[in-house]
Amino acid sequence: MSLLALFLIIGLINAESVHPMLQSASVWDAFNRTVEGRLIKGVPWALPCFPRYESEPNAVDGAICSSLQADYTLPEYRVSSFGAYMQPQWETCQESHQQCLLDSSNPADPAAFENSTCSQGSIPPYYVDVRNASDVQSAFAFAKRTGISLSIKNSGHDYKGRSSGRNTLGLWVHNLDSITSDARFVPEGCDANSSFSTITTGTGALWADVYKYAEEKNITVIGGYSQTIAAGGGWLMGGGHSDLSPVYGLGVDRVLQIKLVTPDGEVRVANACQDSGLFWALRGGGGSTFGVVLEVTYKVEKRVALQVAKLSFNGTSENLPQFYGTLVNSSLNWGNVGWGGHVSLTTMIYVNPLLSLSEAEASMRPMSDWILSQNGSVVIESLPSWYTFFQKYVLSAEAPVGIPLILTTRLIPKSLFETDEGRTVLTNVLIDMIPIALPYIPVVPPVLFKATEGATSITPAWRNALWHLAAHATWQFNTSVPDILDKYALVHNVTEILREIAPDSGAYFNEGDVYEPDHEKSYWGPNYPRLLQLKNKYDPFHLLDCWQCVGWKGAADARYSCYLPEPTSSG
Protein backbone atom coordinates (compact mmCIF):
# COMPACT_ATOMS: atom_id res chain seq x y z
CA MET A 1 0.00 0.00 0.00
CA SER A 2 1.33 3.47 -0.88
CA LEU A 3 1.96 6.13 1.72
CA LEU A 4 -0.73 8.22 0.04
CA ALA A 5 -3.25 5.48 0.82
CA LEU A 6 -1.98 5.35 4.40
CA PHE A 7 -2.43 9.10 4.64
CA LEU A 8 -6.04 8.71 3.54
CA ILE A 9 -6.68 6.04 6.18
CA ILE A 10 -5.30 8.29 8.90
CA GLY A 11 -7.59 10.99 7.62
CA LEU A 12 -10.56 8.64 8.04
CA ILE A 13 -9.44 7.73 11.55
CA ASN A 14 -9.17 11.31 12.69
CA ALA A 15 -11.21 13.34 10.24
CA GLU A 16 -12.97 15.24 13.03
CA SER A 17 -9.92 17.42 13.79
CA VAL A 18 -6.61 18.55 12.40
CA HIS A 19 -4.00 16.26 13.88
CA PRO A 20 -0.19 16.19 13.56
CA MET A 21 -0.46 12.74 11.99
CA LEU A 22 -2.13 14.38 9.00
CA GLN A 23 1.10 15.25 7.27
CA SER A 24 1.26 15.29 3.49
CA ALA A 25 2.25 12.14 1.67
CA SER A 26 5.50 13.82 0.62
CA VAL A 27 6.40 14.47 4.27
CA TRP A 28 5.82 10.81 5.15
CA ASP A 29 7.79 9.69 2.10
CA ALA A 30 10.70 11.90 3.11
CA PHE A 31 10.66 10.53 6.63
CA ASN A 32 10.49 6.98 5.29
CA ARG A 33 13.70 7.59 3.38
CA THR A 34 15.50 8.67 6.57
CA VAL A 35 14.69 5.28 8.12
CA GLU A 36 15.66 3.38 4.96
CA GLY A 37 12.13 2.29 4.10
CA ARG A 38 11.27 0.89 7.53
CA LEU A 39 8.15 3.06 8.00
CA ILE A 40 5.30 0.56 7.98
CA LYS A 41 1.54 0.73 8.29
CA GLY A 42 0.34 -0.49 11.67
CA VAL A 43 -2.80 -2.61 11.39
CA PRO A 44 -4.76 -4.68 13.91
CA TRP A 45 -3.54 -8.27 14.13
CA ALA A 46 -7.02 -9.76 13.60
CA LEU A 47 -7.80 -7.63 10.51
CA PRO A 48 -7.72 -10.61 8.05
CA CYS A 49 -10.84 -12.02 9.76
CA PHE A 50 -13.01 -8.90 9.33
CA PRO A 51 -15.07 -7.87 6.29
CA ARG A 52 -14.70 -4.14 6.99
CA TYR A 53 -11.77 -1.97 8.14
CA GLU A 54 -12.88 1.41 9.46
CA SER A 55 -15.38 2.59 6.81
CA GLU A 56 -14.02 0.56 3.92
CA PRO A 57 -14.57 -3.04 2.72
CA ASN A 58 -11.79 -5.46 3.63
CA ALA A 59 -10.95 -8.72 1.89
CA VAL A 60 -11.19 -11.55 4.41
CA ASP A 61 -8.24 -13.94 4.19
CA GLY A 62 -9.55 -17.30 5.41
CA ALA A 63 -6.16 -19.00 5.66
CA ILE A 64 -4.52 -16.21 7.63
CA CYS A 65 -7.62 -15.82 9.78
CA SER A 66 -7.58 -19.53 10.67
CA SER A 67 -3.92 -19.26 11.63
CA LEU A 68 -4.65 -16.22 13.79
CA GLN A 69 -7.46 -18.04 15.54
CA ALA A 70 -5.15 -20.95 16.37
CA ASP A 71 -2.44 -18.61 17.70
CA TYR A 72 -4.60 -15.93 19.31
CA THR A 73 -3.71 -16.69 22.94
CA LEU A 74 -0.09 -17.77 22.35
CA PRO A 75 2.54 -15.21 23.38
CA GLU A 76 5.16 -16.44 20.93
CA TYR A 77 2.92 -15.38 18.03
CA ARG A 78 1.64 -12.14 19.50
CA VAL A 79 5.16 -10.93 20.21
CA SER A 80 6.14 -11.12 16.54
CA SER A 81 3.36 -8.82 15.26
CA PHE A 82 3.40 -5.06 15.81
CA GLY A 83 -0.41 -4.92 15.87
CA ALA A 84 -0.78 -7.50 18.66
CA TYR A 85 -0.48 -6.75 22.37
CA MET A 86 -0.44 -9.31 25.17
CA GLN A 87 -3.44 -7.66 26.85
CA PRO A 88 -5.52 -6.74 23.79
CA GLN A 89 -7.64 -4.02 25.40
CA TRP A 90 -4.64 -1.81 24.62
CA GLU A 91 -5.22 -2.47 20.92
CA THR A 92 -8.67 -0.91 21.28
CA CYS A 93 -10.18 2.47 22.00
CA GLN A 94 -11.92 1.48 25.22
CA GLU A 95 -13.81 4.73 25.65
CA SER A 96 -15.64 4.33 22.32
CA HIS A 97 -15.47 0.51 22.16
CA GLN A 98 -13.71 0.70 18.78
CA GLN A 99 -11.78 -2.53 18.42
CA CYS A 100 -10.66 -5.44 16.29
CA LEU A 101 -10.71 -8.38 18.70
CA LEU A 102 -11.56 -12.05 18.48
CA ASP A 103 -13.26 -14.06 21.22
CA SER A 104 -10.36 -15.07 23.47
CA SER A 105 -12.38 -17.97 24.92
CA ASN A 106 -13.06 -19.29 21.40
CA PRO A 107 -11.16 -17.34 18.72
CA ALA A 108 -13.08 -19.11 15.94
CA ASP A 109 -16.38 -17.75 17.25
CA PRO A 110 -17.83 -15.86 14.25
CA ALA A 111 -19.84 -13.56 16.52
CA ALA A 112 -16.67 -11.52 17.03
CA PHE A 113 -15.89 -10.83 13.38
CA GLU A 114 -18.63 -11.81 10.93
CA ASN A 115 -20.56 -8.75 9.77
CA SER A 116 -18.32 -6.64 12.04
CA THR A 117 -15.99 -3.71 11.47
CA CYS A 118 -12.35 -3.82 12.44
CA SER A 119 -11.29 -0.49 13.96
CA GLN A 120 -7.78 0.88 14.33
CA GLY A 121 -8.37 1.49 18.03
CA SER A 122 -5.16 2.47 19.83
CA ILE A 123 -2.76 0.81 17.42
CA PRO A 124 -0.40 3.40 15.92
CA PRO A 125 -1.25 3.81 12.23
CA TYR A 126 2.46 4.03 11.36
CA TYR A 127 5.49 2.50 13.00
CA VAL A 128 9.22 2.33 12.42
CA ASP A 129 10.78 -1.13 12.54
CA VAL A 130 13.83 0.09 14.46
CA ARG A 131 17.13 -1.56 13.50
CA ASN A 132 19.71 0.97 14.67
CA ALA A 133 20.31 4.22 16.54
CA SER A 134 19.88 6.27 13.38
CA ASP A 135 16.25 5.12 13.04
CA VAL A 136 15.51 6.43 16.53
CA GLN A 137 17.32 9.70 15.94
CA SER A 138 15.29 10.25 12.76
CA ALA A 139 12.06 9.53 14.62
CA PHE A 140 12.87 11.97 17.41
CA ALA A 141 13.74 14.69 14.90
CA PHE A 142 10.54 14.01 12.96
CA ALA A 143 8.41 14.12 16.11
CA LYS A 144 9.96 17.39 17.23
CA ARG A 145 9.45 18.96 13.81
CA THR A 146 5.84 17.83 13.30
CA GLY A 147 4.41 17.58 16.82
CA ILE A 148 3.55 13.90 16.31
CA SER A 149 3.39 11.89 19.52
CA LEU A 150 5.59 8.81 19.84
CA SER A 151 4.95 5.44 21.45
CA ILE A 152 7.56 2.73 22.03
CA LYS A 153 6.67 -0.92 21.68
CA ASN A 154 8.94 -3.82 22.50
CA SER A 155 7.33 -7.20 23.24
CA GLY A 156 3.82 -5.90 23.98
CA HIS A 157 3.77 -6.97 27.65
CA ASP A 158 2.07 -3.91 29.07
CA TYR A 159 -0.70 -3.75 31.66
CA LYS A 160 -1.18 0.02 31.44
CA GLY A 161 -1.31 0.89 27.74
CA ARG A 162 2.01 2.73 27.59
CA SER A 163 3.27 1.02 24.41
CA SER A 164 0.30 1.80 22.18
CA GLY A 165 -1.44 5.07 21.44
CA ARG A 166 -4.15 6.31 19.13
CA ASN A 167 -2.62 8.38 16.32
CA THR A 168 0.94 8.02 17.60
CA LEU A 169 4.01 7.06 15.60
CA GLY A 170 5.19 3.73 16.95
CA LEU A 171 8.82 2.76 17.44
CA TRP A 172 9.05 -1.04 17.39
CA VAL A 173 12.33 -2.23 18.93
CA HIS A 174 11.49 -5.95 18.97
CA ASN A 175 14.04 -6.81 16.31
CA LEU A 176 17.02 -5.45 18.27
CA ASP A 177 17.60 -8.95 19.61
CA SER A 178 21.34 -9.64 19.73
CA ILE A 179 22.82 -11.67 22.63
CA THR A 180 26.52 -11.79 23.59
CA SER A 181 28.52 -12.55 26.72
CA ASP A 182 31.80 -11.38 28.21
CA ALA A 183 33.59 -12.98 31.14
CA ARG A 184 35.61 -9.79 31.79
CA PHE A 185 33.31 -6.90 30.90
CA VAL A 186 34.38 -3.38 31.90
CA PRO A 187 31.67 -0.67 31.68
CA GLU A 188 32.68 2.27 29.50
CA GLY A 189 34.62 4.93 31.39
CA CYS A 190 35.14 2.71 34.45
CA ASP A 191 38.28 1.34 36.05
CA ALA A 192 39.73 -1.38 33.81
CA ASN A 193 40.72 -3.35 36.91
CA SER A 194 37.04 -3.87 37.82
CA SER A 195 35.45 -6.39 35.47
CA PHE A 196 32.31 -8.49 35.53
CA SER A 197 30.93 -11.66 33.97
CA THR A 198 28.04 -10.39 31.85
CA ILE A 199 25.41 -10.88 29.19
CA THR A 200 24.65 -8.03 26.78
CA THR A 201 21.38 -8.13 24.87
CA GLY A 202 19.62 -6.02 22.33
CA THR A 203 16.60 -4.38 23.93
CA GLY A 204 14.22 -6.74 22.09
CA ALA A 205 15.91 -10.05 22.99
CA LEU A 206 13.34 -12.32 24.63
CA TRP A 207 14.07 -13.86 28.00
CA ALA A 208 13.45 -17.40 26.69
CA ASP A 209 16.26 -16.90 24.18
CA VAL A 210 18.53 -15.25 26.74
CA TYR A 211 17.99 -18.12 29.20
CA LYS A 212 18.82 -20.69 26.54
CA TYR A 213 21.98 -18.77 25.63
CA ALA A 214 22.97 -18.53 29.31
CA GLU A 215 22.47 -22.27 29.73
CA GLU A 216 24.82 -22.94 26.85
CA LYS A 217 27.41 -20.63 28.47
CA ASN A 218 27.00 -22.29 31.89
CA ILE A 219 25.86 -19.05 33.55
CA THR A 220 22.70 -17.74 35.24
CA VAL A 221 21.00 -14.47 34.31
CA ILE A 222 18.21 -12.97 36.43
CA GLY A 223 15.17 -12.18 34.27
CA GLY A 224 11.41 -12.24 33.75
CA TYR A 225 8.77 -14.91 34.36
CA SER A 226 7.62 -15.24 30.76
CA GLN A 227 9.25 -16.47 27.58
CA THR A 228 8.32 -13.35 25.59
CA ILE A 229 9.19 -10.54 27.99
CA ALA A 230 12.02 -8.53 26.45
CA ALA A 231 15.29 -8.31 28.35
CA GLY A 232 15.93 -4.62 27.71
CA GLY A 233 12.50 -3.01 27.78
CA GLY A 234 9.98 -1.93 30.37
CA TRP A 235 10.62 -5.00 32.52
CA LEU A 236 14.06 -3.66 33.39
CA MET A 237 13.26 0.03 33.60
CA GLY A 238 10.25 -0.51 35.85
CA GLY A 239 12.28 -2.61 38.29
CA GLY A 240 12.30 -6.12 36.84
CA HIS A 241 11.40 -8.90 39.27
CA SER A 242 12.32 -12.58 39.11
CA ASP A 243 11.79 -15.68 41.23
CA LEU A 244 15.52 -15.38 41.99
CA SER A 245 15.25 -11.71 43.04
CA PRO A 246 14.93 -12.50 46.77
CA VAL A 247 18.57 -13.66 46.67
CA TYR A 248 20.10 -11.99 43.60
CA GLY A 249 18.20 -8.72 43.35
CA LEU A 250 15.91 -7.08 40.81
CA GLY A 251 16.77 -6.35 37.20
CA VAL A 252 17.72 -2.79 38.17
CA ASP A 253 20.19 -4.22 40.68
CA ARG A 254 21.81 -6.44 38.05
CA VAL A 255 22.16 -4.04 35.13
CA LEU A 256 25.65 -2.58 34.62
CA GLN A 257 25.24 -0.51 31.46
CA ILE A 258 22.54 0.76 29.12
CA LYS A 259 23.00 2.08 25.59
CA LEU A 260 20.18 4.32 24.38
CA VAL A 261 19.13 7.28 22.28
CA THR A 262 17.79 10.12 24.39
CA PRO A 263 15.09 12.47 22.99
CA ASP A 264 17.69 15.16 22.33
CA GLY A 265 19.05 12.82 19.64
CA GLU A 266 22.23 11.78 21.44
CA VAL A 267 23.43 8.17 21.57
CA ARG A 268 24.54 7.60 25.14
CA VAL A 269 26.15 4.79 27.11
CA ALA A 270 24.98 5.17 30.69
CA ASN A 271 26.51 3.41 33.66
CA ALA A 272 27.83 4.19 37.13
CA CYS A 273 30.86 6.00 35.67
CA GLN A 274 29.33 8.17 32.93
CA ASP A 275 25.87 9.68 32.58
CA SER A 276 25.36 8.26 36.07
CA GLY A 277 22.27 10.36 36.75
CA LEU A 278 20.59 9.03 33.63
CA PHE A 279 21.69 5.51 34.58
CA TRP A 280 20.04 5.96 37.98
CA ALA A 281 16.83 7.16 36.32
CA LEU A 282 16.77 4.19 33.94
CA ARG A 283 17.12 1.83 36.91
CA GLY A 284 13.48 2.14 37.96
CA GLY A 285 12.14 5.34 36.42
CA GLY A 286 10.12 3.39 33.85
CA GLY A 287 10.18 2.68 30.16
CA SER A 288 9.10 5.04 27.37
CA THR A 289 10.34 7.99 29.42
CA PHE A 290 14.05 8.81 29.17
CA GLY A 291 14.86 7.47 25.73
CA VAL A 292 14.84 4.43 23.47
CA VAL A 293 17.08 1.67 24.79
CA LEU A 294 19.23 -0.16 22.24
CA GLU A 295 21.08 -2.64 24.42
CA VAL A 296 21.66 -3.56 28.07
CA THR A 297 24.40 -5.38 29.95
CA TYR A 298 23.65 -7.52 33.02
CA LYS A 299 25.93 -9.02 35.62
CA VAL A 300 25.47 -12.81 35.67
CA GLU A 301 26.11 -15.61 38.15
CA LYS A 302 27.67 -19.01 37.63
CA ARG A 303 25.26 -21.81 36.78
CA VAL A 304 23.24 -22.41 39.95
CA ALA A 305 21.47 -25.59 41.04
CA LEU A 306 17.98 -24.99 42.42
CA GLN A 307 15.55 -26.60 44.81
CA VAL A 308 12.02 -26.38 43.45
CA ALA A 309 8.71 -26.82 45.26
CA LYS A 310 5.42 -27.17 43.43
CA LEU A 311 2.39 -27.62 45.69
CA SER A 312 -1.24 -27.59 44.57
CA PHE A 313 -4.67 -28.59 45.81
CA ASN A 314 -8.35 -28.26 44.99
CA GLY A 315 -9.61 -25.11 46.68
CA THR A 316 -12.94 -24.89 48.50
CA SER A 317 -14.60 -22.24 50.62
CA GLU A 318 -13.63 -24.31 53.67
CA ASN A 319 -9.94 -24.93 52.97
CA LEU A 320 -8.86 -21.69 51.26
CA PRO A 321 -8.79 -19.73 54.56
CA GLN A 322 -6.60 -22.49 56.05
CA PHE A 323 -4.29 -22.30 53.05
CA TYR A 324 -3.86 -18.55 53.33
CA GLY A 325 -3.28 -18.81 57.06
CA THR A 326 -0.52 -21.38 56.57
CA LEU A 327 0.94 -19.33 53.72
CA VAL A 328 1.12 -16.13 55.74
CA ASN A 329 2.45 -17.82 58.86
CA SER A 330 5.24 -19.58 56.91
CA SER A 331 6.31 -16.80 54.56
CA LEU A 332 8.71 -14.95 56.84
CA ASN A 333 10.74 -18.10 57.45
CA TRP A 334 10.72 -18.90 53.74
CA GLY A 335 11.91 -15.41 52.86
CA ASN A 336 14.74 -15.59 55.36
CA VAL A 337 16.15 -18.75 53.72
CA GLY A 338 15.88 -17.56 50.11
CA TRP A 339 12.62 -18.88 48.66
CA GLY A 340 11.05 -16.94 45.79
CA GLY A 341 8.21 -17.82 43.48
CA HIS A 342 4.55 -17.37 42.67
CA VAL A 343 1.24 -18.30 44.25
CA SER A 344 -1.42 -18.50 41.54
CA LEU A 345 -4.92 -19.65 42.45
CA THR A 346 -4.27 -22.85 44.44
CA THR A 347 -0.78 -23.60 43.14
CA MET A 348 2.57 -22.58 44.59
CA ILE A 349 5.74 -22.75 42.51
CA TYR A 350 8.76 -21.75 44.59
CA VAL A 351 12.49 -21.92 43.88
CA ASN A 352 15.54 -21.68 46.12
CA PRO A 353 19.24 -21.35 45.16
CA LEU A 354 20.59 -21.58 48.73
CA LEU A 355 19.22 -24.75 50.36
CA SER A 356 19.96 -28.43 49.93
CA LEU A 357 17.13 -30.77 48.99
CA SER A 358 16.70 -32.01 52.56
CA GLU A 359 16.72 -28.43 53.86
CA ALA A 360 14.13 -27.44 51.26
CA GLU A 361 11.87 -30.32 52.27
CA ALA A 362 12.14 -29.36 55.93
CA SER A 363 11.52 -25.70 55.19
CA MET A 364 8.38 -26.47 53.18
CA ARG A 365 7.00 -29.09 55.60
CA PRO A 366 4.30 -26.92 57.24
CA MET A 367 2.71 -26.31 53.86
CA SER A 368 3.43 -29.70 52.30
CA ASP A 369 1.87 -31.50 55.28
CA TRP A 370 -1.24 -29.34 54.97
CA ILE A 371 -1.44 -29.79 51.18
CA LEU A 372 -1.23 -33.58 51.56
CA SER A 373 -3.99 -33.44 54.20
CA GLN A 374 -6.18 -31.94 51.44
CA ASN A 375 -5.26 -34.75 49.02
CA GLY A 376 -3.19 -32.28 47.06
CA SER A 377 0.07 -32.69 45.18
CA VAL A 378 3.55 -32.00 46.53
CA VAL A 379 6.72 -32.09 44.44
CA ILE A 380 10.03 -30.94 45.93
CA GLU A 381 13.03 -31.64 43.75
CA SER A 382 16.49 -30.51 42.70
CA LEU A 383 17.09 -29.12 39.24
CA PRO A 384 20.48 -28.31 37.73
CA SER A 385 19.79 -24.79 36.45
CA TRP A 386 17.38 -21.90 36.04
CA TYR A 387 16.80 -22.85 32.41
CA THR A 388 15.74 -26.36 33.40
CA PHE A 389 13.31 -24.88 35.93
CA PHE A 390 12.00 -22.37 33.39
CA GLN A 391 11.32 -25.04 30.78
CA LYS A 392 9.66 -27.45 33.21
CA TYR A 393 7.59 -25.10 35.33
CA VAL A 394 7.38 -21.53 34.07
CA LEU A 395 6.21 -22.04 30.49
CA SER A 396 3.04 -23.75 31.70
CA ALA A 397 2.45 -21.16 34.44
CA GLU A 398 2.82 -17.90 32.51
CA ALA A 399 0.17 -15.20 32.82
CA PRO A 400 -2.53 -15.55 30.15
CA VAL A 401 -2.37 -13.42 27.02
CA GLY A 402 -4.89 -12.58 24.32
CA ILE A 403 -7.58 -11.75 26.88
CA PRO A 404 -8.28 -8.28 28.27
CA LEU A 405 -6.76 -8.34 31.75
CA ILE A 406 -5.98 -5.63 34.30
CA LEU A 407 -3.96 -5.79 37.52
CA THR A 408 -3.55 -4.07 40.80
CA THR A 409 -0.59 -4.67 43.07
CA ARG A 410 0.88 -3.62 46.39
CA LEU A 411 4.25 -4.31 47.95
CA ILE A 412 3.51 -5.98 51.28
CA PRO A 413 6.14 -5.06 53.88
CA LYS A 414 8.04 -7.65 55.85
CA SER A 415 6.88 -5.98 59.07
CA LEU A 416 3.32 -7.27 58.53
CA PHE A 417 4.63 -10.85 58.78
CA GLU A 418 6.57 -10.19 61.98
CA THR A 419 3.65 -9.84 64.43
CA ASP A 420 0.57 -11.86 65.23
CA GLU A 421 -1.57 -8.80 64.58
CA GLY A 422 -0.01 -8.16 61.17
CA ARG A 423 -0.34 -11.77 60.09
CA THR A 424 -3.99 -11.82 61.14
CA VAL A 425 -4.74 -8.61 59.22
CA LEU A 426 -3.06 -9.92 56.07
CA THR A 427 -4.73 -13.33 56.28
CA ASN A 428 -8.15 -11.72 56.67
CA VAL A 429 -7.54 -9.50 53.62
CA LEU A 430 -6.63 -12.56 51.53
CA ILE A 431 -9.78 -14.33 52.71
CA ASP A 432 -11.89 -11.26 51.92
CA MET A 433 -10.46 -11.22 48.39
CA ILE A 434 -11.65 -14.79 47.64
CA PRO A 435 -15.12 -13.81 46.36
CA ILE A 436 -13.55 -11.16 44.09
CA ALA A 437 -10.62 -13.08 42.65
CA LEU A 438 -8.10 -15.42 44.24
CA PRO A 439 -5.00 -13.37 45.01
CA TYR A 440 -1.93 -13.67 42.82
CA ILE A 441 1.26 -13.43 44.85
CA PRO A 442 4.68 -13.01 43.24
CA VAL A 443 7.16 -13.68 46.04
CA VAL A 444 9.87 -11.61 44.37
CA PRO A 445 11.04 -8.63 46.48
CA PRO A 446 14.83 -8.65 47.05
CA VAL A 447 14.57 -9.51 50.74
CA LEU A 448 18.09 -11.01 51.10
CA PHE A 449 19.86 -8.93 48.46
CA LYS A 450 22.29 -6.34 49.83
CA ALA A 451 21.53 -3.35 47.62
CA THR A 452 23.59 -0.18 47.57
CA GLU A 453 21.37 2.49 49.09
CA GLY A 454 20.21 5.05 46.53
CA ALA A 455 21.68 3.20 43.53
CA THR A 456 18.29 2.77 41.84
CA SER A 457 15.19 4.94 41.40
CA ILE A 458 12.50 2.38 42.28
CA THR A 459 10.43 3.05 45.37
CA PRO A 460 12.39 2.14 48.52
CA ALA A 461 9.34 0.04 49.47
CA TRP A 462 10.83 -2.76 47.36
CA ARG A 463 13.66 -3.09 49.88
CA ASN A 464 11.31 -3.63 52.83
CA ALA A 465 8.78 -5.94 51.16
CA LEU A 466 8.30 -9.69 51.35
CA TRP A 467 5.41 -10.04 48.87
CA HIS A 468 4.21 -8.34 45.73
CA LEU A 469 0.47 -8.95 46.16
CA ALA A 470 -1.80 -8.71 43.13
CA ALA A 471 -5.40 -9.08 42.04
CA HIS A 472 -6.84 -9.00 38.54
CA ALA A 473 -9.99 -8.80 36.46
CA THR A 474 -10.76 -9.93 32.90
CA TRP A 475 -13.49 -9.48 30.33
CA GLN A 476 -14.44 -10.56 26.81
CA PHE A 477 -14.60 -8.96 23.37
CA ASN A 478 -18.34 -8.24 23.70
CA THR A 479 -18.32 -6.89 27.26
CA SER A 480 -20.06 -3.52 27.30
CA VAL A 481 -18.28 -0.31 28.26
CA PRO A 482 -20.31 0.05 31.51
CA ASP A 483 -19.37 -3.51 32.49
CA ILE A 484 -15.71 -2.85 31.67
CA LEU A 485 -15.89 0.21 33.89
CA ASP A 486 -17.18 -2.05 36.66
CA LYS A 487 -14.12 -4.29 36.21
CA TYR A 488 -11.81 -1.31 36.60
CA ALA A 489 -13.74 -0.19 39.67
CA LEU A 490 -13.49 -3.64 41.24
CA VAL A 491 -9.71 -3.72 40.80
CA HIS A 492 -9.39 -0.11 41.94
CA ASN A 493 -11.26 -0.91 45.13
CA VAL A 494 -8.89 -3.80 45.84
CA THR A 495 -6.08 -1.28 45.46
CA GLU A 496 -7.64 0.76 48.24
CA ILE A 497 -7.89 -2.30 50.51
CA LEU A 498 -4.23 -3.14 49.97
CA ARG A 499 -3.21 0.48 50.56
CA GLU A 500 -5.05 0.41 53.89
CA ILE A 501 -3.00 -2.49 55.24
CA ALA A 502 0.29 -1.13 53.85
CA PRO A 503 -0.19 2.67 53.72
CA ASP A 504 3.51 3.50 53.78
CA SER A 505 4.50 0.98 51.12
CA GLY A 506 4.33 1.30 47.34
CA ALA A 507 3.53 -0.54 44.14
CA TYR A 508 5.29 -1.97 41.09
CA PHE A 509 5.18 0.46 38.20
CA ASN A 510 4.81 -2.27 35.57
CA GLU A 511 1.91 -4.04 37.28
CA GLY A 512 0.05 -1.37 39.21
CA ASP A 513 -3.56 -0.28 39.06
CA VAL A 514 -4.18 1.61 35.81
CA TYR A 515 -5.66 4.33 38.01
CA GLU A 516 -3.11 4.04 40.83
CA PRO A 517 -3.82 6.81 43.37
CA ASP A 518 -0.91 9.12 44.06
CA HIS A 519 1.13 7.19 41.51
CA GLU A 520 4.24 9.33 41.90
CA LYS A 521 4.57 8.30 45.54
CA SER A 522 3.46 4.70 44.98
CA TYR A 523 5.98 3.95 42.24
CA TRP A 524 8.93 6.13 43.19
CA GLY A 525 8.45 7.58 46.66
CA PRO A 526 11.08 10.20 47.51
CA ASN A 527 12.87 9.60 44.18
CA TYR A 528 10.23 11.33 42.06
CA PRO A 529 11.49 14.95 42.23
CA ARG A 530 14.94 13.95 40.99
CA LEU A 531 13.40 11.73 38.29
CA LEU A 532 11.32 14.66 37.06
CA GLN A 533 14.39 16.87 36.97
CA LEU A 534 16.24 14.29 34.85
CA LYS A 535 13.21 13.86 32.60
CA ASN A 536 13.25 17.57 31.84
CA LYS A 537 17.00 17.48 31.26
CA TYR A 538 17.04 14.63 28.72
CA ASP A 539 13.60 15.20 27.18
CA PRO A 540 13.12 18.99 27.35
CA PHE A 541 10.41 18.97 24.65
CA HIS A 542 8.58 16.00 26.19
CA LEU A 543 8.73 13.96 23.01
CA LEU A 544 8.03 10.89 25.16
CA ASP A 545 4.97 10.71 27.33
CA CYS A 546 3.00 7.77 28.69
CA TRP A 547 0.27 6.99 31.20
CA GLN A 548 1.38 7.73 34.79
CA CYS A 549 5.02 7.85 33.70
CA VAL A 550 7.53 10.38 35.03
CA GLY A 551 6.51 13.78 33.69
CA TRP A 552 3.00 12.59 32.77
CA LYS A 553 0.80 15.52 31.78
CA GLY A 554 -2.42 13.92 33.01
CA ALA A 555 -5.43 12.10 31.63
CA ALA A 556 -6.80 15.22 29.90
CA ASP A 557 -4.08 15.02 27.26
CA ALA A 558 -5.64 14.12 23.90
CA ARG A 559 -3.45 11.05 23.44
CA TYR A 560 -5.29 9.40 26.35
CA SER A 561 -8.76 9.87 24.90
CA CYS A 562 -9.23 6.11 24.60
CA TYR A 563 -8.74 5.48 28.32
CA LEU A 564 -11.88 5.12 30.39
CA PRO A 565 -12.60 7.66 33.13
CA GLU A 566 -11.10 6.96 36.51
CA PRO A 567 -13.38 4.77 38.64
CA THR A 568 -14.59 5.97 42.01
CA SER A 569 -13.74 4.06 45.16
CA SER A 570 -16.53 2.33 47.04
CA GLY A 571 -17.12 3.23 50.64
Image (spheres, rainbow, N blue to C red):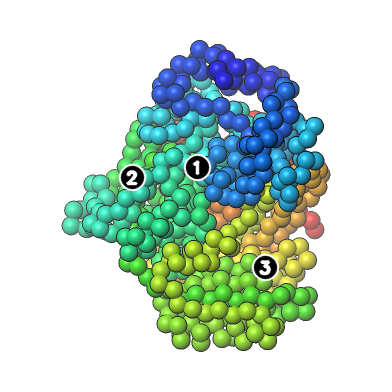
- Mark 3 residue crowding within 10 angstroms, few (<14) / some (14–19) / many (20+): some
Q: How many marks?
A: 3
The reply, left or right, for residue 352 in relation to residue 87 is: left
Give the spatial CA distance, label 2 vs label 3.
Answer: 41 Å
- Which residue shows up at 23% across the image and 57% down it? 184
Q: Which mark is residue 345?
A: 3
Q: Quadrant of residue 432?
A: bottom right
The reply, left or right, for residue 463 in relation to residue 371 is: left
Q: Amino acid at mark 2?
A: Ala
Q: Secondary structure at mark 3?
A: loop
Give the spatial CA distance, label 3 vs label 1.
Answer: 29 Å
Where residue 246 appears, as percent x and y from the top left, is 46, 69
Mark 1 or mark 2: whose residue is earlier in sequence = 1
Q: Secondary structure at mark 2?
A: strand
Is residue 158 positioned above or below 43 on the image? below
Q: Check whether the beta carbons of the residues at disc 1 and disc 2 lie within 8 A of each other.
A: no
Most foreground residue, 534 or 269: 269
Give the spatial CA distance, label 1 vs label 2.
Answer: 20 Å
The reply, left or right, for residue 9 in relation to residue 479 is: left
- Identify the residue position indicated by label 1 in the image: 154
Q: Check whether the beta carbons of the residues at disc 2 and disc 3 lie within 8 A of each other.
A: no
- Mark 2 residue crowding within 10 angstroms, few (<14) / some (14–19) / many (20+): many
Q: Secondary structure at mark 1?
A: loop
- Which residue shows up at 35% across the image and 49% down it? 179
Mark 3 or mark 1: whose residue is earlier in sequence = 1
Can residue 369 be seen in the rendering of this structure? yes
Most foreground residue, 162 or 82: 82
- Identify the residue position indicated by label 2 in the image: 270
